[in-house]
Each structure stands twice: as C-alpha cells, then as structure tokens.
Image (cartoon, grey):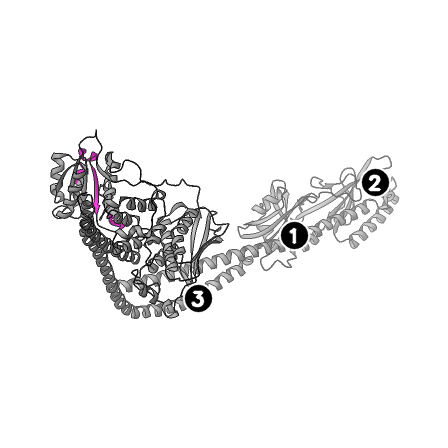
Amino acid sequence: MHGNQHLTSKVASLFLLLSLIAIGVVGGVAFYRAREALKQAAYNQLSVAATLKEEEITRWFQDRQQDFFAIAKFPAQRQIDKILQAQSASKRNLATHQIANYLIDITQTKPDFQEIFILDRSNKVILSTNKQHEGQYEILADTTYIEKIEQGKTFAPIFYVSPNTGKPAVTLATPIRDAAGVRQGLILAHLNLDRIDRIVRERTGLGKSGETYLVGSLVVKNTFISKADRTDMQAFSMGVSSQGIDTAISGVSGFGLYQNYANVPVIGVYRWLNAQDLALLVEMQQAEAFTPARQLAGTIVLVGLVSVGVLSIGVYWLAQQLQLSRAQLENYSHKLEQKAQEALAANHAKSAFLANMSHELRTPLSAILGFTQLMTRDPALSAAQLENLATISRSGEHLLTLINDVLSMSKIEAGRITLDETNFNLYNLLDALAEMFEIKAEAKGLELIFQRALDVPTYVRADESKLRQVLINLLGNAIKFTATGRVILRVSVISDRQEQSSEGLTLHFEVEDTGMGIAPSELERLFKPFVQTQAGLQSHQGTGLGLSISQQFARLMHGEIALRSTPGQGTIFSFDVPVNRAQIIEESETRVRQRAIALAPDQPIYRILVVEDKSENRQLLVKFLTSIGFAVRAAENGQVGVSIWQTWEPHLIWMDMRMPVMDGYEATRQIKSQAKGKNTIVIALTASAFDEERALVLSSGCDDFVCKPFLEEVILEKMAKYLGVRYLYADSQPTVKSTEYALKVESLSVMPQQWIEELHQAALRTDEKQIFSLLQQIPSANAPLADGLAEAVNSFRIDKIIDLTQPGSP
C-alpha cells in the first residue's frame, strides 16, 4: 500500500515537473518567435528611418553644391578681377564694396553658408562676409577643393574639426581665373552643418532609446560628424568604434545586433554614404525593442504557473481519490488473481487429464487392435474365428473414433489445433469429392452438382486436410438428410486481397440441398458439441461433433460457417477461406499396398529392442517383429533398456515414453549422449494426441515417433526407412486395380453389419488409417474384396466405399 502511495507521489511529481518544463518550453518558444518578429519589425522601421535620413542628407549636400556653383558663376566676375588686378585704390574699393554687399546678401538668403570669402594668390583673405576674417591668411589643408564645377556632378566633402568651434566643419573652394586661365585667387565658403544636425536629431518612430548619428574618418580616427547628444561627441573626442561603425566605415551597409560605441546592446542599421564619405547609423536599444517579447513570455509563464497550481490541486485530489479506490481495487484484483490461478490450475488439470486419458485409453486399445492384426495373419484361423476377430477390431475402432473426436474437440477448445498450410491442387480436391459422393447421390436419386467459377485458381496454399474435412461433413450431411432433389457445391472468388498480398484471395464455398431443412429452434445449438438435430437423432448415426468440429476448423482457417434454412425446402451452408495462389506442384503417385510376411534374403540379422512397460504391448511388438524375422529383445523400463543396449547394441529401439523407474525421455537422452548411441535409431511409441508432447519427444533425441494404436505397415515402413530393411510380401505383384474386381454391395455380405457401419463412418471422415485397419479384418479367403477396397482408397475413390456401405443401399 505504501509502495503504491509512493508511486502516486512520484507520478504526481513527475507530472508537475513535466508541466513546468512544458511551460518553460512554451514560454521560451513564444519569446523566441516574438523576439524574431520584433527584430524584423525593428529592422524594417530603422531601415525606413535610415533611408529617409540618407536621402535628406544627400539632397542637402546636392543643394549646397548647386548654390556654391551659382556663387562661383555670379555675374560680378569683373569686379573680382578689379579687386585682384586694379591699380587704382578707388576702383578697388568700389568693386570691393559691390562684391561684399553681394556676398552678404547670399549668406542672408542662404543661411547654410556660414561664411563666404575670397583669397588672393598668397591665400590672404581680401574679402569676407565676416570682416574680422579679412586680412588673415587661410590654411587650405582640409578644404574641399573643386577645380571645376559641373552641374549634376557630385563631390565628396572633406570634414575637419574647426579650430574656432571645435566641431566638424566643411569648407568648399574653387579657383578664380582670369581671361587667360591663370589662377588669380580662390572663392571659399564655410558650410553651416546645423541642418545636418537637425536631420540627425529627428527621432520620429525610433522610440525612447533610438538615436541617429553620422561618423566620419578624420585623419586616424573615426569621430562623430553629427549627433543629437553633444556631450557624447565631447566624451568620445578620441574616436568612436563599434561593429556597426567599423563595418560602415569600411564601405559596407547592413544591419544586425551588436554593442554600440558605448557598449550598449542595440539593434541597428548602418549605411555608408559614398558620395559624402560618411557612415550613417540608426540604432535602438535591444532592451526597448524586445520588451514586448519579454512581456509576452512572462505572461505565458505566469498563466502557466497559475494553471500548474490549479492542476496541482487537481492532481492532489485525484491522488487522494486513487488512494481511496486502490484499496478496493487491490481486494478485487486479489480475488481476480485467485480466480485466474484457479482457472489456470483447472486448465492445467484438464490438459493433464486429457493427456493421461489419451495414454490410458490408447495403450489398451493398441494391444487390442495390435493383437487382432497379429492374429489375422494366422492362415489356420477358421471363418468363425476371423469373424470374432473382426468384431473385436470393429469395437476397438469404434471406441478409437470416439476418443479421437473427443480429443479433437478438446484440443480445439484448448487452442492446440493449428493450421498446416500446404500447396495443393484445389481442382483435384473438388473432383475427388465429386467422385466420392457421386455414387451415393445416384443411389438416392439425387442430382449432385459442383459449380466452380472460372476465376477459381487451380493451385492454392491452405490447410487441405481441414478444408476437405469441412466439405466432406457438409456434403455428407446434405446427402444424408435430402430425400429428393439436388445437392450443389459452389466455389467462387469473392475478393482479391491486394492490400495484403498480390497472391492473396478469398474463396467462397456454399453447399445447398433440397432436404427437410432445419427448424429455427434448432439453429442456435446446431454447432454445439454432441448436439444433433431431430433428423440426426432419428438417423441413429454420428456423435454430434461433425458440425462443431467443422465450424472450429473454418474459424481456424479465418472463416465462419453460416447457414440459411427453410423447413421443408432445404438448407444452405456457406463459409469463406482466405488462401494464397500457389505454383504448380507435382502430384503424388498412387500407392500400392502389400502385406509383408518375412525378411528378404541376403540381409544382416537386425537386432531390435522393444522397451515397453505394459506386458501386453511389449509382447505384441515382440511377437510381430519375431514373426517377420527380426532378432528381438524386450525391456520393461528405461533403465533395463539402457542396460541391454550397452551390452547387445541393437540397431533400432522401439521406446515407450511413459514408464516407471526410468521413462523413455531419460533413457533416450542417456543413449544418445554416448558416442555409440549416435548410430542407434530410437523411435518413440506414444499414446499422446497432443502435438506439444510429440515435439518434446523429438527434442529428447528420438529420431521419429509412432502413435498408438499403430498399424503393422507403419512399423515396417519406419524400419525400412531407417535401416533399409527389405521384405517379402504375400503377393509380389502390385495389388490389382479396382477394374479387375467389381465392387458390389453384395460383396460386403461376408462381413458383419457392424463392420460395414464402421467402414462407412471411417470413409465419411476419410480416415484412411482406420479404413486399412478394418480391411485387415477381412478373411484371407476374401482377399480380392480387401484388395479392391484398398485400391479404391489408394486411387482416391473413397466415395465408392461410402456408397457401398450406405445404410439402405440396394
């Protein structure tokens, strides 16, 4: 309980931690996205401001260029010549007065010209709008000298620090030449940069922290040319530098995030004004630009924290509810666990019971049927004795049939029946079924129709055995319970399973009869085990397992048997089977059945060891193998068997798996673990009907296995397979074909009625093993009958046997 509480606390803590992480991630993402959006918006806003200021500055310098062009070309050129060349003082004074008034008028109408003055050849100021400046000599080192002024041509001003104002200044100069083109003097004009300052100080759209400034290169340092805050210009009199300033001064324009000249993080746009040799920078502090993003992220985090708080309260309440309900769930789970353990134990007990019952029932049956086969080999037996043996064999076979049906149903319920898919010829299967039931249908005057669609493939991959069993059961029931009319088997393709496999398709099977039909009250329990309809009860045939097993087989093949029935008109059974198309396969040849009577000559003496705890089964194998000519020894348990093997070294061991003292599994492991045991063939004798136990038998080291009760021919075939034994047969020629012996109903009159009924049931199930077991009960005097029936089985004409043994056949 405390562990569960701790787990709940861990889950709640983890939930809160993940919630906080999620909030942090959401806030971070929101801040990043908002920051990027604001950064782009700020870039756009600063770029617009920079473009406008760049245009105004450029236009101002162009206007001043035009004005200076007009001054240099004024019509008083002759008066200037008089000033520079006149010998008479009165003429020079008059010209000076006229030019001075003209220049004063220009400075008054053009305030951007701070001062205009004229120099002679010695750079002496002979005339100026500032009288105090006249008579002084002018230093022309930082003067923007224009040799020739052409309209439309721009110039690059030279900035310098004025010795009078201590601020950046620009002075324009152009030569004065006489008619011969000889330089007589200079016209100079100091520009007033106050308008540039006003353009730079304009902060519309730049926020509280936005600023614009011009930086120029003066000799060896970069300095402010114009800036809103004059104190910064004085504080950085030694030069300014930043990523934006240095990049712009190098002639590159752009934008970015960087620290400005005062090491304050800013977002800025920098432009290089090539015509003016100036760097224009428009910047805004990042703190102001990204404030909305931080506010948004903070709001998201705050809302998230509040939500987490509310969720925490909810989680705590849920944890309390979980703790309250957990106690109830634990009690309920404990009860369910007990029930599950009880059900598992019951299932294991059922499996163990079935395995034990299979062994306990098949073991005595093996002795009964085996000794019956052994005794029928005696040619001295009379007809009465053979009939008695036949009765014993029929009773045993009938009991074995019931055991097989019950065990099959039990294996189905336990989920131990699996699909055994193989490639086979579907057309041959349908043709064999048609031949099988044709005579029986004709005997009852019924029309048997097999309808196969054209798109049904010849070769398919599916479980042929289970498909055949289902069709035999449905067709057999249809013919059995139909007095007049017809029975139809339809096969068609209803869909191609292209989405699963290019070779996949679904076959639809339908069996229709015109029989008595099934009452609606019987439909619900029709497929239940051991349940028969009223018609089935009246026929006194079957165990009531046929339809139940068929339904289970159909479901195992991923289908479902459905039916539609109208009492008095007939019934239609149908089911679907998913299959795959298969390649052409080689058809197996018809088998020839012969009865071995002795070993062929010129062979070694084969030593055979029989290890069996049941004395009757042990004696059965010993007598049978001895009669054939083998050297045989026997052991009653695995320990004795290992001891005999060590000293006698048999070629082959028939090993029972369930024995006292030492079972067959341990005995086989001990034999196979030794070097000489590798060459000893060990074949298991098992009475189990379960595939798991057979797999366990092979994993223990056995080379093969044979199920009890067994047929003589199976024992001999296994020995021939592993030892290469050759036999002499009662008839050295192959069994004659059925055409050499006409099988008739009256031919079976030599056998008891019970034997005929058992043969009929075995044929309906196509149980070839049981059929051959029954045929061995036929007296040797009637060998042609046995051979004719065997040939019918070998040629896949079991339908003939069904028709011959049909109750009420003429």
Q: Earlier in the sequence, mark 2 or mark 3?
A: 2
| Residue 430 point in image, percent of width and height | 42, 50
The residue wearing badge 1 is 50
Q: CA distance from mark 1 to mark 2?
A: 46 Å
Q: Position of residue 707 (x, y in %)?
A: 24, 47
Name the residue type under label 1: Ala
* Amino acid at dot 3: Gln
Q: State the image coordinates of residue 83 (x, y, percent, origin top left).
A: 84, 42
Dot 1, crowdedness within 10 Å: few (<14), some or many (≥20)? many
Q: Which mark is residue 569?
A: 3
Of the pair 375 and 230, the residue shown nearer to us:
375
Left or right: residue 7 compared with residue 498: left
The image quadrant that residue 289 belongs to is bottom right
Number of numbered discs visible in the structure rendering = 3
Q: Identify the magenta region.
A: 670-693
- Numbered mark located on residue 84 in the image: 2
* Callout 2 crowding tier (Cα within 10 Å): few <14, some 14–19, many ≥20: many
For the C terminus, which image quadrant?
bottom left
Is-magenta flag for residue 765? Answer: no
Which corner quadrant of the image does residue 320 belong to? bottom left
Residue 735 at least partly seen: yes
Residue shown at the point (60%, 42%) measured from the top left = 221
Find out whether the residues at labels 2 and 3 contact each other: C-beta distance under 8 Å: no
Q: Give the side of residue 610 with respect to residue 217, left or right.
A: left
